[in-house]
Image: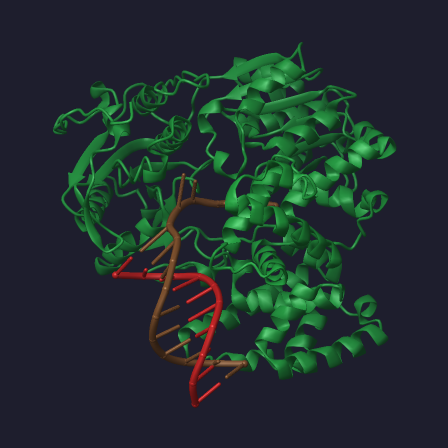
Chain colours: A green, B brown, C red
DNA sequence: GCGCCATGAGGTACG
DNA sequence: CTCATGGCGC
């Protein structure tokens, strides 16, 4: 059986899998089979080391990744006929999901009720506005969004509301110093935590309750952490606390793919690890199974310009491959037309190719508009990944507000939202709340029944007209939410799922220009449009990176800061390494920007590519020295 | 409670 | 230019 598992791995991967005891770092390059190593390591621990599955913790970056990895693990376990029952599976999830579970169970020790709410960004904003209102701080002078991100940043650095004032410098931060404590109080009055609190309160729980910490240390004997380069300080702290006793901690990461420092991620955690665990072993996965050597060479050449972190050199058996094409368009429309031409050309050359083998990656969301317009004009099918998320839609938030208030009448933010829907509807709703609590319906009715009752009691659906396309899609979204409710008949569990789980984009929110068979679960045959950030972890046969201009990519706000430029370069590295077979980099000489025509220089990242891997017809621009150097 | 207009800002995004 | 927000009048 052991051979069976290990035969699927190369030498480097095998080493990383079979060494399980003690602290270790796996430096895993893009496309090097990192997920495979994590999955097989868990499998190896269970089947070979006879570790109880419940003693394994694997943390991931997203819920999606967690779901996929657990599925693979369970599938392989079944294949190896190792009896794993539902109550006997490894814990796989994000830090936030893990912390939510821990706090539901043990938060009471630090005054957090088990039915606490999790406030999302919109709820948080409402709270900030409420706090500013109380303090008479005008939202015009001090923007709530800015306040919120400053508070979040402070929380990421583990600065509490009581001590923030000591660090506050300047007009804005002094305002935040007043708002932050009030914000925190309001959260607590609502029995709510924000996402940052989930992490911070767990740390506080661990630090003040030895027994609780000890319980989880005994439970999670083997800890694996994915995407360690994108952990923030709180997440770093949690892994350290949890692994302090057994020290069986395996972290996986890649410096070159750290692209989330703007939200508190710190790739130096990857370096700190070896200082915290002096005897930590290091394994590197350097064989790439995704791209051609030319693509890898291009990526390496670019990323080698970064000075503040180590860089893995990747190799592949897939030598050669096609050259990388650079295209300089006059306008952004022409840039998109070039893409369409190339897609059709490639499809002609190879009839097996689907539209979905092509991805267009861009730096900022605003770039998608022109792409959509031109694709639409040429009747080329596309899907836009991203945009307004399902659970952030108005109608979904409304229905959730009803349910959330029913589950926890302390939720004043939900009530405020309900009031906004309509005063009369609020009265009708409160009538139902009375009925609901007096008859204790939370115990007897399913989520779906409650949802349907609320919706009909206040005739919520009559707000929307089926004949107006936009409103019809709102009605469809509510239907979609009903199907989620079917999966979670317990109201509390349903709300927990909604708060923590990133929703798949349902069909209605997929903006496809051609209504292909977009049925749930089916990948539509359409060109994929997304930001470079969204592309992390994915791969496509052909990749177009557009807007390769100074000011666009690297982004204008990163130009003056070396560490931000390095992050942009890592983002570029991530983009290049998404391509399996063919890579195009395009730029436009002129571009409409905030209604004005702007002329941008060619991106430095293009000039950092090795000439050997470029199509010959690319005429290099005059080299330039950025002014700030 | 809704719709209209003025104003202002404009990165990336997971839980 | 485009979108989000907030104030105000009906």
Residue A90 visible to an observer of this rendering: yes
Of the pair A332 and A15, the residue shown nearer to us: A332
| Image position, residue A256 (x, y; %) | 44, 25
Q: Residue at x 74, y 81 (%)?
A: A431
| Image position, residue A171 (x, y; %) | 51, 46
Q: Is residue A596 left or right of residue A116?
A: left
Q: Is residue A14 left or right of residue A78?
A: left
Furthest residue in direction right, as rendered: A211
| Image position, residue A592 (x, y; %) | 22, 51
Q: Residue at x 67, y 9 (%)?
A: A279
Q: Quadrant of the N terminus of chain A?
A: top right
| Image position, residue A158 (x, y; %) | 65, 35
Q: Residue at x 41, y 78 (%)?
A: A468
Give the vertical position of A38 relative to A275 (above or below).
below
Q: Is residue A200 left or right of residue A462?
A: right
Of the pair A352 and A494, the residue shown nearer to us: A494
Give the vertical position of A454 relative to A62 (above or below).
below
Residue A71 visible to an observer of this rendering: no
Q: Is residue A577 left or right of residue A482?
A: left
Of the pair A117 and A138, the residue shown nearer to us: A138
Q: Quadrant of the C terminus of chain A?
A: top left
Give the vertical position of A79 relative to A499 (above or below).
above
Q: Quadrant of residue A13?
A: top right
């Amino acid at each position: 059986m052991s051979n069976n598992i290990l035969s699927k791995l190369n030498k480097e991967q095998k080493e990383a899998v079979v060494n399980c005891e003690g602290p270790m770092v796996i430096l895993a390059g893009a496309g090097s089979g990192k997920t495979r190593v994590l999955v097989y390591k868990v499998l190896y621990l269970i089947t070979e080391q006879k570790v109880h599955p419940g003693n394994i913790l694997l943390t991931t970056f997203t819920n999606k990744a967690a779901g996929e990895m657990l599925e693979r693990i369970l599938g392989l376990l079944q294949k190896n006929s190792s009896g794993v029952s539902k109550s006997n599976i490894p814990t796989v999830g994000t830090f936030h999901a893990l912390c939510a579970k821990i706090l539901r169970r043990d938060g009471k020790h630090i005054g957090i009720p088990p039915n606490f709410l999790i406030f999302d960004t919109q709820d948080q904003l409402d709270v900030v506005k409420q706090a500013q209102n109380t303090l008479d701080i005008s939202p015009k002078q001090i923007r709530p969004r800015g306040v919120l991100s400053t508070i979040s940043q402070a929380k990421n650095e583990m600065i509490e509301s009581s001590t923030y004032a000591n660090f506050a410098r300047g007009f804005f931060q002094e305002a935040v110093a007043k708002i932050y404590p009030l914000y925190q109080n309001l959260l607590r009055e609502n029995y709510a935590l924000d996402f940052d609190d989930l992490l911070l309160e767990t740390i506080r729980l661990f630090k003040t309750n030895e027994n609780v910490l000890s319980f989880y240390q005994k439970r999670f004997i083997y800890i694996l952490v994915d995407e360690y380069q994108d952990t923030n300080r709180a997440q770093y702290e949690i892994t350290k606390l949890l692994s302090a006793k057994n020290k069986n901690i395996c972290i996986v990461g890649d410096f070159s793919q750290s692209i989330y420092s703007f939200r508190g991620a710190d790739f130096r955690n990857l370096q700190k690890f070896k200082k915290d665990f002096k005897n930590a072993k290091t394994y590197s996965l350097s064989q790439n199974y995704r791209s051609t050597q030319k693509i890898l060479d291009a990526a390496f050449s670019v990323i080698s310009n970064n000075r503040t972190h180590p860089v893995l050199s990747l190799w592949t058996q897939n030598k050669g491959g096609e050259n990388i094409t650079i295209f300089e368009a006059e306008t952004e429309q022409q840039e998109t037309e070039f893409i369409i031409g190339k897609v059709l050309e490639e499809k002609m050359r190879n009839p097996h190719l689907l539209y979905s083998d092509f991805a267009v990656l861009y730096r900022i969301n605003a770039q998608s508009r022109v792409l959509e317009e031109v694709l639409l004009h040429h009747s080329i099918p596309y899907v836009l990944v991203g945009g307004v998320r399902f659970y952030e839609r108005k109608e979904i938030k409304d229905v959730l507000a009803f349910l959330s208030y029913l589950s926890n009448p302390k939720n004043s933010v939900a009530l405020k939202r309900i009031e906004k829907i309509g005063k009369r509807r609020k009265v009708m709703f409160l009538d139902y709340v009375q009925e609901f609590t007096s008859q204790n319906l939370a115990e007897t009715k399913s989520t779906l029944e409650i949802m349907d009752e609320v919706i009909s009691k206040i005739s919520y659906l009559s707000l929307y007209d089926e004949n107006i396309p936009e409103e019809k899609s709102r009605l469809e979204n509510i239907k979609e939410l009903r199907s989620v409710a079917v999966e979670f008949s317990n109201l509390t569990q349903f709300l927990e799922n909604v708060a923590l789980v990133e929703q798949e984009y349902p069909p209605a929110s997929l903006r496809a220009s051609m209504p292909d068979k977009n049925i749930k679960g089916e990948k539509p045959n359409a060109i994929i449009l997304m930001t470079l950030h969204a592309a992390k972890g994915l791969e496509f046969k052909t990749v177009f990176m557009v807007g390769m201009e100074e000011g666009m990519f690297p982004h204008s706000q990163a130009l003056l800061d070396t560490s931000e430029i390095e992050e942009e370069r890592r983002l570029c590295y991530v983009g290049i390494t998404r391509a399996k077979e063919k890579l195009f980099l395009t730029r436009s000489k002129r571009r409409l920007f905030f209604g004005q025509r702007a002329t941008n220089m060619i991106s430095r990242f293009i000039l950092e590519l090795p000439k050997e891997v470029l199509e010959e017809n690319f005429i290099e621009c005059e080299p330039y020295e950025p002014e700030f150097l």
